[in-house]
Image (cartoon, grey):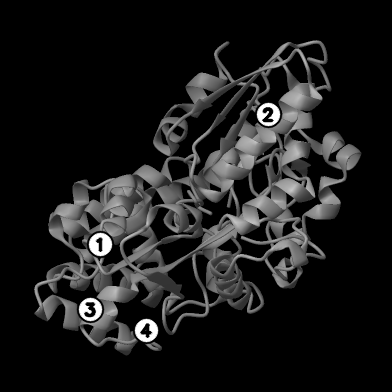
Amino acid sequence: MFRSRAGVAAGALFLVSSLALTACGGSGSSGGDDGKDAKTLTLWHYEGPTSAMGIAWNKAIEEFKTSHPGVTVKFEEKSFEQIQQNAQMILNSDSAPDIMEYNKGNATAGLLAKQGLLTDLSDQVTKFGWDKKLSPSLQTTDRYDDQGIMGSGKWYGVSNYGEYVEMYYNKDLFKKYNLQVPATYDDLVKVMDAFKSRGVTPLSVGGAEYPAQQIFYELALSKANRQWVNNYELYQNKVDFHGPELTYGAQTFADWVSKGYIAKNSAGIKAEDMGVAFEQGKFPMMFSGSWWYGRFQSEVKNFDWGTFLFPGNTMHPGSGGNLWVVPSKSKAKSLAYDFINITMQPDIQNLMGNSGGLPVAADPNAITDPKSKELIDNFNKVSTSDGLAFYPDWPAPGYYDTLVAGVQGLINGSKTPAAFLDEIAKPYNENLSDIGK
């Protein structure tokens, strides 16, 4: 999913090589190294200008312009939702950009690769040496087989950052109510109860987009192990949607709503509004991805804040970052490859790291920002324990929208946990039938 946002590359500071993620495949269309004489590079991504990736990629655009005199960069910032919902239509048209950021996983990049809408980057990966900068675990979400299943086969994307999901918290509000960072799940419940008893809703949640479903998934992961994740994400074995993992996730999420930990109006709140509300100090906690980190570093001025991993869990949503992909209809593929290569350079990677991101090829000694080191430390705790569990919407095409609608039903009370699980089981199992699993 978004942000669906893992690791940090080989030889570098972030120990990504210790990840032990596995998968299967890649396919789609091939594209040559054409567009050498193009004079315009059209680039789309959905990272905010103050985010770590936005800062680093803006610098990469400057460097690209310097190294490509006479070439115009036409950058268009899109929302995650715009690209998520319209990619197939756009990439099937003559309006396709030359390069864009796209969500990784079977249901997104894998589906587009299977449909022939993405350029096979395998030759470019070898030419530029990107495979040497990306550990095998990071390559999982860059490569897809003929069925669009991630993990092996051709390269259809390149991750140049990592990501994972954790809890952001307002240190000033914790101090005001004499609360400590929770070390266990029971401690977390006590903290949320303490805030609720004082009339404070504990969690800022965006139910209209990805954040709420990631809470549901994190709760399910508290009862899961690596094999369950591989079954769910990589189709290694059948998944029981009324088994202990998903049942606990759905029931506990519904309980959190009934207890007031999650506001019922959050069903209509988007991720951006969720983050802004946390920035404004309206909520003491927000469970979301590392992609917010750099933005909070630059924008949160009125209180001190920090992060902690979901207490008690060894597995968390996370993966290699979203992908640079080159649409099959790109008119400037050669320029697109050059731009990807610039984003992999040490200076751009170091800038990302010091801006609150998780770069894949940074110089360890160049990461000097204290908060960035905190982010990286938590990431290392997850990655060294093989704790990156991908995202809940990856397994099937259109599954993101299914999960958004389903979790909204849990928030507004229109669905029981059992009905929610039946609803999300149907497209998952239909997809397995479609691919012969």
**Which badge, 3 or 1, is on the more N-terminal residue?**
3
Q: Which residue carries the number 4 mark?
A: 181
Residue type of the residue flagged with mark 3: Met
Mark 3–mark 1 CB contact (< 8 Å): no
Residue 231 place in picture, x, y as percent: 55, 65
Residue type of the residue flagged with mark 1: Gly
Q: Which mark is residue 326?
A: 2
Check disc 3 and report its element: helix, strand or loop: helix
In this rendering, position of residue 230 left or right of residue 257: right
**Which badge, 2 or 3, is on the more N-terminal residue?**
3
Q: For the residues marked 2 and 3, what is the alpha-carbon distance in whole angstroms?
A: 44 Å
Check disc 1 and report its element: helix, strand or loop: loop
**Which badge, 4 or 2, is on the more N-terminal residue?**
4
- Within 10 angstroms of label 3, few (less than 14), some, or many (20 or more) residues? many
Q: Nearer the viewer, mark 2 or mark 1?
A: 1
Residue type of the residue flagged with mark 4: Val
Tell me the residue at 20%/65% (across/down): 262
Q: For the residues marked 2 and 1, what is the alpha-carbon distance in whole angstroms?
A: 40 Å
**Which badge, 1 or 4, is on the more N-terminal residue?**
4
Q: For the residues marked 4 and 3, what is the alpha-carbon distance in whole angstroms?
A: 11 Å
Q: Nearer the viewer, residue 35 or 152?
A: 35
Q: Nearer the viewer, mark 2 or mark 3?
A: 3
| Residue 263 vertical placement versus 252 (above, below) | above
**Which badge, 4 or 3, is on the more N-terminal residue?**
4
Q: Nearer the viewer, mark 4 or mark 3?
A: 4
Q: Which mark is residue 192?
A: 3
Q: Which residue carries the number 1 mark?
A: 281
Q: For the residues marked 1 and 4, what is the alpha-carbon distance in whole angstroms?
A: 17 Å
Check disc 2 and report its element: helix, strand or loop: loop
